[in-house]
Image (cartoon, grey):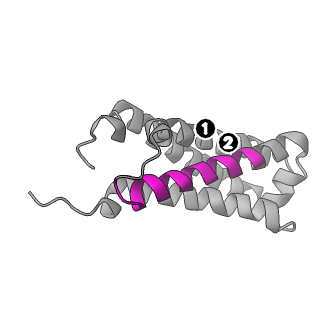
Amino acid sequence: MVRPHRLLLFHVAARAALLSQGSTTAALGWWSPNSLTARLLVDGGAIGEAMLIAMSGLVCLGWLDVLVNDIMPERMKLTPLRANEHLGYMMLGGVFWVQAMGSTSTELPGAGVLLANYLMVGGVCCWYGWTSAMLGGRKQGNPNE
């Protein structure tokens, strides 16, 4: 049986999509001060800033995992990231859900769009982390890999 290239597998595409969403949210928070996301996170006080820092850290770890464990040659692996990636996506989903709660407490116009986005992406992040953990992830020989 011919196996597809590892970059064509579902889990790489799913993680890249979730990390792209997180990267966009973090970038808006840091570098676009007039965006709705930045106003929610930065003007939200200590909790908003903590969520921005947490999201930035989780996204950086996620992209490092994708780069080293999926794109680099097989001999170059970061085993702790690979073994615990499900926790990172569940935490990223939690950060999105905390941001969703924050978007309901603001009078900013368009906050409903952020609410829907954060709830949906947070749910997908948690679903991906949970299913990865239940299937044993890549550390125990996922048949999809």
| Front residue of 65 and 13 | 65
| Residue denoted by label 1 | 91
**Residue shown at 47% from the left, 45% from the top:** 78
Q: Where residue 44 sits: x, y (%)?
A: 88, 47
| Front residue of 41 and 1 | 1
- Give the residues in magenta: 53-74
Residue 45 seen by the camera: yes
Q: Is residue 34 above or below residue 100?
A: below
Q: Where residue 72 sits: x, y (%)?
A: 41, 60
Q: Is residue 98 above or below residue 38?
A: above
Q: Residue furthest left?
A: 1
**Residue shown at 87% from the left, 68% from the top:** 34
Q: Main secondary structure of the magenta part?
A: helix
Q: Where residue 67 sits: x, y (%)?
A: 48, 59
Q: Amino acid at mark 2?
A: Val
Element assignment for label 2: helix
Classify 10 Å Cα crowding around label 2: few (below 14), some (14-19), many (20 and above). many
Circle number at residue 95: 2
Mark 1–mark 2 CB contact (< 8 Å)? yes
Q: Is residue 47 above or below residue 114?
A: above
Q: Is residue 73 magenta?
A: yes
